[in-house]
Amino acid sequence: MSLRASNLAVVSRDDAAAPFCNDFVANEADLPGAGLDWLSARRKQAMDAFAKAGMPHRRVEAWKYTDIAAALDGALEPATPLHSPLIRKGALADPFVDVPGPRLAFVNGFLAPPAHIPAGIEIADLGALSYRAPDWVAEHLGRAATEASPLGVLSLGLMRGGVAIRVSDKIETPLHLSFLTPDREQALVSHTRVLLILEEGASLTLIESHLGEGAQQTLANIGVEIVLGEGARLDHVRLHAEGNASLHVTTSDVSIAGRAQYRGLFAALGGKLSRLDLAVHLMGDGAEANLRGLTVLAGGAHSDMTTLMDHAVPHTKSRQLFKSVLGGRARAVMQGRVLVREGAMKSDSHQLFKALLLGERAEADAKPELEILADDVVCGHGAAVGQLDTESLFYLRARGIPEAEARTLLMRAFLEDVIEGAARSDIHDALWSRLDAALPAISGEGA
Amino acid sequence: MNMLEIQNLHVAVGGKEILKGINLSVPAGEVHAVMGPNGSGKSTLSYALAGREGYEITEGRILYQGADLTALAPEERADKGVFLAMQYPVEIPGVTTLNFLKTALNAQRRARGAPELDAMKVMRLVREKAATLKIPEDMLKRALNVGFSGGEKKRMEILQMAVFEPKLAILDETDSGLDIDALKLVADGVNALRDPSRAMLVITHYQRLLTHIVPDRVHVMVDGRIAKSGGPELALALEEQGYERIVEAAA
């Protein structure tokens, strides 16, 4: 292993960041794609940015509700590929088992050998890059990682696994990315990248699930880049339901060209602490984004959905609806910044955050931010935090429905418009069956 | 036997006494009307009978089929056959009317130890009752009361009454917000459910509902008490002379 002089710059005085910088200095030459100059340069730049920013903590404005530095507890070993077969049952059972389509499974961040990939989709295993990579991977990989997102640049700097996907056609069956963190003996960290490119006119339904189990702490650090070409259309459904020892950060960047459409549904149903950092850039005339988020948490779980909606050019449209149902001491953070850039007239944006607090010590933090630098725009936003409606609860009980069941029914009613019409009916049903299993526990904690 | 026997009922809401000693009995097979001006405590009475939280019974008893109801939760009262058709039925997005009816009916059946009905059987039952109330089938597939007109919501209350087949039905201002056609439809639905084994308490501000649902007895409620009781002719007298004169005469 050679240690190049340039690596010496990657040092950090930040205790929480130092192990990651040390990992890079010690292992840079062994990381996948170490023979690719362009990748090495981007990794190096990323690690410099990370070292400079440090591990985010509550005194960093964007992370004030989600102190990831404080949550990191002790040493985390970099994950290595798992060689024994993985049994998918219990917490790792596939919630979308009834939804057809190819699956790409990632175990501790490493892509398992994929099944049949249909025509119109190309994939490249980012954990197996050596001296060669497809041009389209070289063109895009890591381009969106900026120092504004320290965990995002870290996922590039220390990327050990991941996948690049290029879609050139209208694909009917959903593609499923399944991230699994099985029970293990050590505390582990994984850094994984996903690059998804939809070429002009292409379309895809993407399912992304994150499942885990076990009592040892894990940090899954994932960086996602999505590039939608002219008129492309992506339906993206994400389910996060890791175990209660897991820390998770996904930093996602979506770039949408003219007339292209992005619909995202993000469900957070588990984990100890998770954050989805999502930046959406509307880059062409007629570009549209529709984001919906739902957080259903019990116990002491913490979920953070932070979005940037960037109206970069005129005639773009965005809709955002985020709802949380929280029992026990659970906490949901909803931060949304809408940016309408100079000259981006006729931008049409709406954002709404709503939360139901059912646990006595549950907490919701909603922070909408509007930054409008253009004239002739329509931008609306709102936030509301409340409890179950007592009138409705009485109505259902007076019809003979027991209180716990009535509460669950009202939580379901609260979440309905987040899910309704946001996905194919089989995906919709799979999400509901997951929610129907989760909601009664919250009802019990709230009573 | 009296299906319902209210004895010296005092109810406070938020620490303020609203009902100040109600005495009222409704035998099985009879329909009684409770009339009264706004603020007399009519809705408080209906909520207290159904067991709504926050309606504190400070004195007195509510006997239903001879047993005291006052300690029971709303769902337990429903399971025993008490039904309240509400003045303002709530909207429940995300739950179809049919699914709601199935959930509620089976919850009641479960509590009574009766076997639950499958979706097909519930569907058949509901469809048949809905037809007589002129409730179109697509309404059953829509979320409960969401986007329904005032008249549709009230018809939906009567449909529930028809499906649950309660022993004691309390109708709280079921006529409010209805035009004459809707009123007639609702009244016909209620009349069809008159039965020797069932008692009904019809709470209303206006006499007009009582020309369609002719009561056996009429009680006039003023300031938390029954000020006067009489036959159906009392409702007409109220309409002609107003509450004030009738009440003054009673005082």
Image: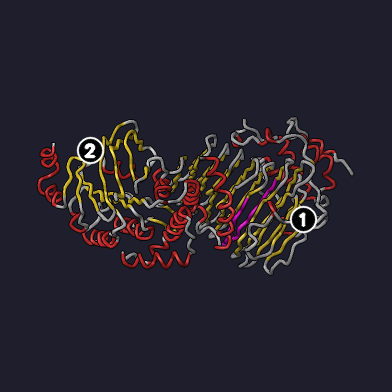
Quadrant for residue A300, please give it.
Answer: top right
Q: Position of residue B88 (x, y in %)?
A: 32, 49
- CA separation, marks 1 and 2? 72 Å
Numbered mark located on residue B225 in the image: 2
Identify the image's colour scheme: rainbow, by chain, secondary structure or one colour: secondary structure
Numbered mark located on residue B20 in the image: none
Q: Position of residue A354 (x, y in %)?
A: 48, 44
Residues packed near mark 1 inside 10 Å, few (<14), some (14 to 19) or many (20 plus): few
Q: Residue at x 20, y 53 (%)?
A: B216
Q: Chain of mark 1?
A: A
Q: Position of residue A302 (x, y in %)?
A: 61, 40
Q: Position of residue A107 (x, y in %)?
A: 75, 52
Number of marks in picture? 2
Numbered mark located on residue A86 in the image: 1
Examine the structure image and report whether residue A234 is included in the region drawn in magenta. Answer: yes
Q: Amino acid at mark 1?
A: Leu
Instruction: Report if residue B164 is visible in the image.
Output: yes
Which residue sits furthest front?
A: B1
Which residue sits furthest bottom?
A: A119
Q: Residue at x 45, y 59 (%)?
A: B102
Q: Chain of mark 2?
A: B
Q: Amino acid at mark 2?
A: Arg
The part of the chain drawn in magenta is: A221-239
Q: Residue at x 58, y 39 (%)?
A: A330
Badge 2 marks a residue whose secondary structure is strand
Badge 1 marks a residue whose secondary structure is loop
